[in-house]
Image: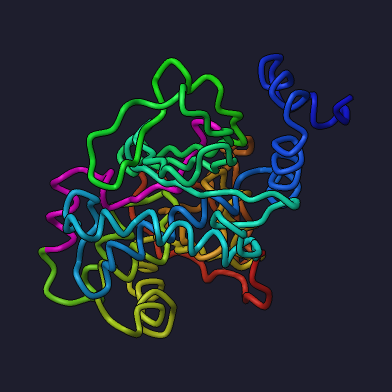
Amino acid sequence: MLPLDLAAAVNIQSQVLLQEDPELAAVYSRLRQLDPTGQRFAAVLRDTIDQLLNGEATGRYDWKSLYKTEKTHAGTVVEINLQREFKFSDGIDMDYEIAGADVDCKYSQLFGGWMIPPEAMGHLCLLVWADDYKSEWSAGLLRIKPEWLNKGNNRDAKLTVKAEHRKKILWLWHGCALPENVLLHMSESDREAIFARPSGQARLNELFRRAQQRRIGRSVVRTVAQQKDYMKRVRGNGGSRTALREEGILIMGDYDSHRQVAAQLGVPVPAEGEFVSVRVAEACSGQPSSPGVVLGGRRWVVASATDAPQTAPPLPTHTKQAR
């Protein structure tokens, strides 16, 4: 019998797969134990895409701008970064050893596009998909059987999983949210306004003006600043936090005190390595029920379009980074 917590996490068809394949069940259970929410997996995929784009050096933010060789290399980088994050041992014949089983790892930016090599027949495969345009990702396990694969025409005899047999994939996480690539998903006019600025500092200021109440990762900051000291350009003492304060804009980072401010204002809370900007206004007496935060002895709320700009209060001193 499956453990109750494991059985509750999967549907009936998946339970059948787990009952029939103890090795599959062991690998599934171990991966869910390592990453119950999928947040670690999602972070690896986000970081891998950003690593390939290399925005700090190239200014790129769009998967389509990658060279063909870079896209081909993506699967290898995903495999390496997942192994580093989860500290999987090397497999005997496949990429990893997980819960005593040999597991191959295959990544595709196209759902269903996993290329299965002949040597993976009979083995478990960890099938990973991420789409930066949809901001979604999935990862599942499949025991590779020849009859479930399409006939291939490529030179290295790699095959893909037939569409009708994808239902046999045991999903660890399916259709989950990939941390947003803000530059990719913002309007063309906003993007042009940001990159039209002549300096890295001015571009970052424009980014935080135009991408308010959205989680902005460090990779986006690097891409916009295109400077080695990009973090200095965000902070106070002359960075965006100082420059935009007079416009009423707060820039919260991933410190506990900043996260608490974001939560009290009712805006997205920055995760590790993220920033969230928002324009605030001093609360009026008629706004007692609006989400707000007390800073500098006064109560502040998210500013409306009709609120005149006010100098924002200083953020609390940060002493501990959120994990």
Q: Position of residue 157 (x, y in %)?
A: 31, 41
Q: Position of residue 95 (x, y in %)?
A: 54, 57
* Residue 188 magenta-highlighted: yes
- Does residue 7 lie above or below 247 as drawn? above
Specify the color scheme: rainbow
Q: Visible in this render: residue 306?
A: no
In the foreground, 250 or 144: 144
In the foreground, 280 or 138: 138
Quarter of the image where the N terminus is located: top right
Position of 71 compared to 271: left or right?
left
* Residue 271 magenta-highlighted: no
Position of 267 compared to 67: left or right?
right
Residue 161 figure quarter: top left
- Does residue 222 lie above or below 6 as drawn? below
Q: How many marks?
A: 0
| Residue that appears at 43% across and 77% down | 235
Quarter of the image where the C terminus is located: bottom right
Position of 143 compared to 200: left or right?
right
- Does residue 279 lie above or below 229 as drawn? above
In the foreground, 188 or 37: 37
Q: Position of residue 229 (x, y in %)?
A: 35, 84
Position of 271 compared to 148: left or right?
right
| Residue that appears at 56% across and 56% down | 93
Q: Position of residue 155 (x, y in %)?
A: 23, 45
Q: Visible in this render: residue 266?
A: yes
What segment carries the magenta color? 174-195
| Residue that appears at 17% across and 77% down | 199
| Residue that appears at 43% across and 40% down | 129
